[in-house]
Image (cartoon, rainbow, N blue to C red):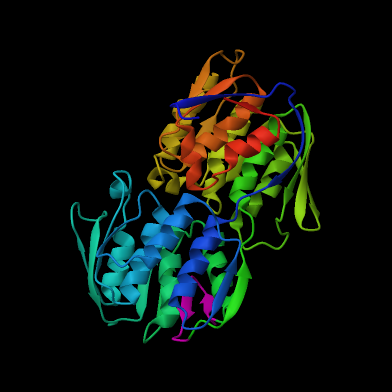
Amino acid sequence: MESGSIKIYHPFKEIISTIDLPSSKSESNRVLIIKNLSQKKIALDNLSSARDTQTMIKLLKAKSEVIDVIDAGTTMRFLTAYFTSINRKITITGSKRMQERPIHILIDALRWVGADISYLKKKGFPPIEIKGFRQEQSYIKIPGNISSQYISALMMIAPTLPNGLEIEIIPPILSLPYIKMTLSLMKHFGVKYEFENHAISIKPQEYQEGAYKIEPDWSAASYWYSVVALSKSSEIRLNGLRKKSFQGDQEIAQIMKDLGVKTSFEQDGIRLRKTTYGESFQFNFSNCPDLAQTVAVICAAKNINAELSGLQSLRIKETDRIAALKAEIEKLGNKVVVDGDEKIIIHKREKKLPDNLSFKTYEDHRMAMAFAPLALLKEISIQNPKVVEKSYPSFWEDFRRANFQVN
């Protein structure tokens, strides 16, 4: 795996396996911010080993005047709000791609509240310099159709501000489950809030003492749904997932009913089994955009017509995921039509799958993991396989446990 690509194949195409998924980096990153904002003792268990979370842990402890979030978007946004709220003078930078990902909506909101923040290169993009903060406003309006991480970042600091915050979200609101996840975790540590008519009101208060065990990652679970869907037959148990989850990507269990996977909730986990599926597929991913790549590849592999909408935020992720999906799925022979920034349409292919399939990952962990299950159809290559370390460091080892040949 030291080379630029790996080859993957499954000799049997029938899988019976049990997988310990990585911890949720979405939960981990939120509770780390909450812990550092709290004046009380907070104990955290099962923190994610993903590179994004480990970067967050490292930078929260850093004493330097300049910190580098590398390619961790959540870390960039959460730390920008966090360091502003504690009035720490600091410069935050990141990778070349991070410096192409907009942050002006969050900066505009923080400036309105009272922050002195400057852009060091291109206006609206990292790197940024936080020079100081004194709260001047307690009411802000912010668009809900870009990234819920801006809203989560503001919500988490709100209780610690002298006047709290009232955040009016301009609809439509994308990724609403991520906002609700943040509020649920804040509530777990004693914060009271009101959420009515697109407005979230959080008065000044303290995070309370408590403990929390991070759940396994439902986003990571989606790749095993794909494995079941594309296998001849399989039964896979995923340990630790909860029926009552804070994670919006639990929606994969409902989505995959239409794509041939049945989910059974058991004590401390779920069991996946292959079932029948329909001839076409439609779904709006506004509330769970991180599942879109996985599902798009499943539809193309199963050779069914599909329409995936609600994809606006995919343009500003680790790569332009809409363009990347079109380029890589069309290697299978399916025609992919992009309808603006919001929708992709996948058409059935008329020919058999080509040989020598090799997929680019665009420095995007989810591209690698979304395309990897295609190895159940024929041998494939994945370029730059180490990108999975961003969210699921043990991904290739887990594939080997499920009898995939990964070389």
Image spot of residue 10 (x, y percent): 68, 24
Residues 312 and 42: in front is 42
Up-down relation of residue 360 to residue 85 (above or below): above
Residue 343 visible in the current orientation: no
Residue 396 visible in the current orientation: yes
Image spot of residue 348 (x, y percent): 60, 23
Q: Quadrant of the C terminus?
A: top right
Query: How many labels were placed on the picture?
Result: 0
Up-down relation of residue 117 to residue 189 (above or below): above
Q: Residue 119 is drawn in which quadrant?
A: bottom left
Residues 243 and 217: in front is 217
Image spot of residue 330 (x, y percent): 50, 23
Indicate left or right for 138 with 149 as reference.
left
Residues 218 and 9: in front is 9
Residue at x 46% of width, y 66% of height:
152
Residue span colored magenta: 191-205
Indicate left or right for 382 with 126 as reference.
right
Residue at x 46% of width, y 50% of height:
51
Query: Is residue 218 rendered magenta in the image?
Result: no
Indicate left or right for 187 with 343 as reference.
right
Image spot of residue 282 (x, y percent): 61, 40
Query: Is residue 193 rendered magenta in the image?
Result: yes
Q: Residue 294 is drawn in which quadrant?
A: top right
Residue at x 40% of width, y 60% of height:
58
